[in-house]
Amino acid sequence: MRESGRGPEDLSAAVRRAQGLLQGARSAVGSDSGLPDPAVRPAAHRSAPLSDRPRPVADWPPGRLGVHPAVAGAREADPARFVLPAYVVRDHDRALRACLTRAADAGRPSVVLVRGESCTGKSRTGYEAVRSCCGDRHLAFPKSGQSLLELLDALATDAVDPHLVLWLDEAQNVLTGPDGERAALRLRRLLETDRPFVVLMTMWPEHARRLSERPEGLREDPHRQVRALLTQADVFPVPATFSGAAIDAAGDGRDPSLELALLTGRDGAITQTLAAAPQLVEHYESADGGSACYGRAVLTAAMDARRLGYGAALPLGLLEAAAPAYLTEAQRAAAPPDWFDRALAFAETEIRGVVRSLSGVVAAGGMGAEPGVRRLADFLDHHGRLTRARIFPPQGFWDAVRGHAAGPADLLALGGSAENRSRFALADALFRRAGEEGEPRGWVEMARLRWERGHEDEAVALIATAHEHGDSGALTDLAHWYDEAEDYERAERYAREGLRAGNTEAMLLLADARYTSDSEEIERLTRAAAESGDLAALTLLATDRMRAGDEDGAEALYRRAMAAGHVHAVGELTLERARRGDAAGAEAAAWEALASGDSFPMALLGHVVMSEDPVEGTRILRQSADLGGLPPARMVNLPALPYMGRFHALMVLAGTAEAEHGEEAGLAVWRQAAAEGDQHAATWLAGILSRSGRGDEARHLYEEAVAAGHLPALAELAWDYEASGERAAAERTALAALDAGQSRARSLLGRLWAQSGRLDDPDDLLGRGLDVTGGPAPAWLPGPG
């Protein structure tokens, strides 16, 4: 960033203006989100022989490491052979191999994350890099958190060669299990030693984002150690498509599989074609007649289970119990006695000899499959999340879930999905089951549902139950609720009880002028919270030190918070450096945030600079609007954090253009973003146009965004229908929006139903919610709120 000669006093007013817009930007971009995954609780670690023994890299067949076989080309003589096409080295391969080589030369431990969407070649990328750079080492592939802990024990005691490659394909399946947090913590500690091992993880971007973002609100942070581990990883994104140069390299005609992929692939999506994804989807979509309909029903049940929060290992009992809900009455009546066996045969059919819709789950020891469970193919999972996003599963699915939930983690996640879709009674029942099966957060979620509906006494009683069952944060949650209700006496009482119970989050609540006027007490509590690992407290303490002139001390605290994954620490560092007139340092921090996927600090910095140096501010804002290189066409349903910086940058750029050149110039900024495929921008533009009387153009943009799969546009389209007097369309679209988890449509649907007599009062829908079929649910809370 170019120096402009401005001092801290010139920037302070602009900083305050930019910070004041933060909440507005969050509200504008914010989307409904499900409950975070439940907290991972450590299980007792057994001393036993290694379940997953290391063996030489050369002894590992690629299929055992998760590499998918490719479609056999036209010239392939043996279609049963495991086909591994010629590998095309691309830029991300070169960067990954250079990283592994540097780590090997330095004799230090290394952790890398190969990140990419389904069927983009993540596992093959890692496999080829390990063969190239670590071919003389041993490799271990732990299949569970317990197995990973065993290997880490062996590494820590030098019971295995420290030159070990730990292969964590689809790492979220290990790191989010019962032992995931313990394993992540042990890995972090081992990374501080001189053992030269390598951890190679692969992960979908959505899993990486979920595990990297600290959950907002009052709930416990379930992946604190995993998130901190991911911040230490060197990340290598695998593009979803091949570039022109890579396509040219692949198209030399020497490999029949690549030749077939180039012939049938679209838009450079070679790896997806190699993995037979189109045939996989066609196999599912075309299964309407004969006994194939039973297979389709089983797969649809599996898709719904996965997209609503069920774990990767799906019990056969769940699929058998849920499948009838996806069949017509005639199909159920005609079902033969062995219908489920036929359904499984259909679902386990190999597509082009490459992939099955349902496949076995590898046993913990690495040989054979776990009995009684199956795993849905990744691409079919992805397909279900896209095509069934607006469909709420039928009653039979939820009955099956209650009878076959694998554990409280599934119940909490499914309850969160039900709540997001306004099925409050169903969510409450699932949360209760989670609490009864040993997850005290279930009781907390039940309490929150009641608190939000005015049932204070019941909420307090349930918080007490959660506390009695071991949730140390439950009392602090209640303290926060009272604080928001401005009942400061009760808030302080429960915060101090929570602190006595060992919950350090209560310190930060108590370190507030509402509870003490003693500045030394406030600092003591904040410092104690920071020393206990509270990331928000670390950031607050860092900001206080920066403003007191202790730049080195502040920098160290910011770095600690950033290393542990606090998403707002780098933004605070950016603004504080800008406040002090350190333009170059502020931009460096913003670039650091952008590299980690958070573009908001860059956008705020551009906003701050814009008032002093419009040319430089525009440059920074345009950089933020690039979203770190993510194509705008992919910005369909991104979570708020990675999109918020681009949105804020577009807001400032459009506002500046409008102020200087008129309304159409501001609209042109949004039009350009929408034309690039940014559906967030298209929906925002539609709202502006609708309010200015250009309803036809607004309606077109809303409908295009909905067609592109942008779920928030559903709620906006419903409001647009209602404003145009199209009540039936408004009601139908509002219900679809709620089924997709977009709660903004709830007040509209309540109003429409009250007008038609289906509800006595529009606000009744908040208390009652919907039943499974999409009608108003009966009252499920005892007595008035």
Image: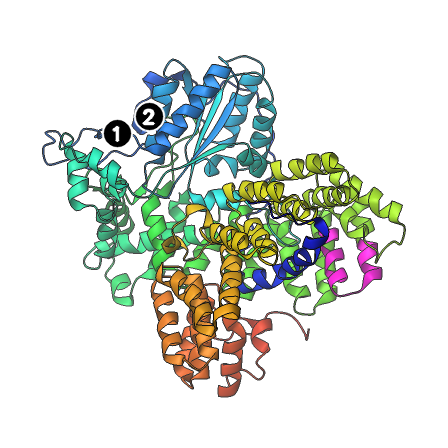
Q: Assess whether residue 582 is covered by the magenta stretch.
A: no
Q: Which residue is mark 1?
A: 87
- Viewer-proximal residue among 461 and 5: 5
The disc labelled 1 sits on which kind of residue? Tyr
Percent coordinates x, y for residue 239 in the rendering: 35, 41
Secondary structure, mark 2, is helix
- Depicted 693 relative to depicted 261: above or below: below
Secondary structure, mark 1, is loop
What sort of colour scheme is used for the picture? Answer: rainbow
Mark sitting earlier along the chain (2/1): 1
Q: Assess whether residue 480 is covered by the magenta stretch.
A: yes
Q: Tell whether label 1 touches label 2 (CB within 8 Å).
A: yes
In terms of image quadrants, where is residue 556?
top right
Give the quarter of the figure containing the N terminus.
top right
Is residue 301 in view from this perspective? no
Q: Residue lying at the far right in this picture: please name it.
A: 518
- Depicted 243 relative to depicted 609: above or below: above
Predominant SS along the magenta part: helix
Please state the extent of the stretch shown in magenta in the rendering.
Answer: 474-494
Q: Which residue is mark 2?
A: 128
Horizontal side of 413 relative to 302 (left or right) equals: right
